[in-house]
Image (cartoon, rainbow, N blue to C red):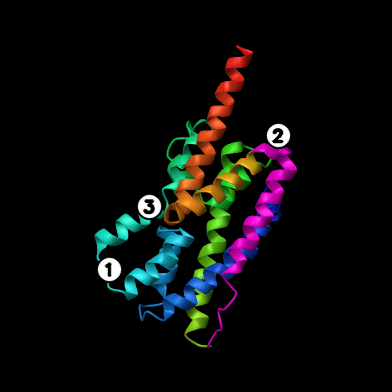
Amino acid sequence: MIRRIIKQTTPIMFGYIPMGMTFGVLFQGLGYPWYFSTLMGLFIFAGAAQFMAIGLLSAGAGLTEVFISTFMLNFRHVFYGLSILEKYGKWGLRKFYLVFGLTDETYSLVTTIKVPAEVNEQNYYFFITLINQGYWVIGCTLGVLLGGLVEFNTEGMDFALTALFIVLVIEQWKNIRDILPFVIATLSSIFVLIFFPSQMLVGSIMLSISILITLRAIKNKSYG
């Protein structure tokens, strides 16, 4: 099972470790102990929020500012969570870790892969989440350690996450084979980027979901 999961999460590994290293290198410049980077990977595990934290910490932001900024940045996970409530809903305490470890990439994987019939579904999703977080923690740790020893040019490394999203979109397409959600997401993103650029991420997600829900309601009503 673990070998199969590692194979399925390899694209995520190639995104998480370089991005985690980039975070570690940048974090090292703040002057905090190296293990703080590892602890952030363990207990925060939110790539965009951790990068944002570097700017907030360097600017001397207060806890309230950090909390509000992080909440708004990760608000999209509310929509992810709603879509998999039924999948994670009856798994007891392990569910809390699955919720905590739900990243964009993990969500994309658990909503598209087929769990082998002979494997416990709960264990399969748990180890996917755990291994993905492991990649991120390794990257954060390597980055902060190497950043203190060698000078790095981090220019272009941020594209690793963009490349990872492209790979995941391709995987989604191969599994779904329905172009409508992709078209709606693209058009929604363009619309929000033009009219509400400051709310690009949350706005495009909300608009896409609203359109998809409306279309499904119309479809169900027509069949009813």
Q: Looking at this view, is 27 or 118 the one in front?
A: 27
Amino acid type of disc 3?
A: Met
Per the rendering, the mark at residue 61 is 1
Judging by the rendered image, the residue that carries numbered circle 3 is 72
149 in magenta: no
Question: Which of the 4 quarters of the picture holds residue 180?
Answer: top right
Q: Quadrant of residue 53?
A: bottom left
Q: Which residues are magenta?
A: 151-180
Q: Position of residue 119 (x, y in %)?
A: 66, 38
Of pointers 3 and 2, the one earlier in the residue sequence: 3
Q: Main secondary structure of the magenta part?
A: helix
Which residue in the protein does label 2 denote?
Answer: 117
Check disc 3 and report its element: helix, strand or loop.
helix
Residue 122, position in %: x, y?
A: 56, 38
> Horizontal and vertical percent for residue 190?
56, 51
Residue found at the far top of this picture: 224
Q: CA distance from mark 3 to mark 1?
A: 16 Å
Q: Residue at x 41, y 58 (%)?
A: 44
Work out how far the residue at label 3 is from the one at label 2, CA to CA, in angstroms.
39 Å
Q: CA distance from mark 2 to mark 1?
A: 50 Å
Check residue 51 in the rendering and tell me which mark sits there, or answer none.
Answer: none
Q: Quadrant of the C terminus?
A: top right
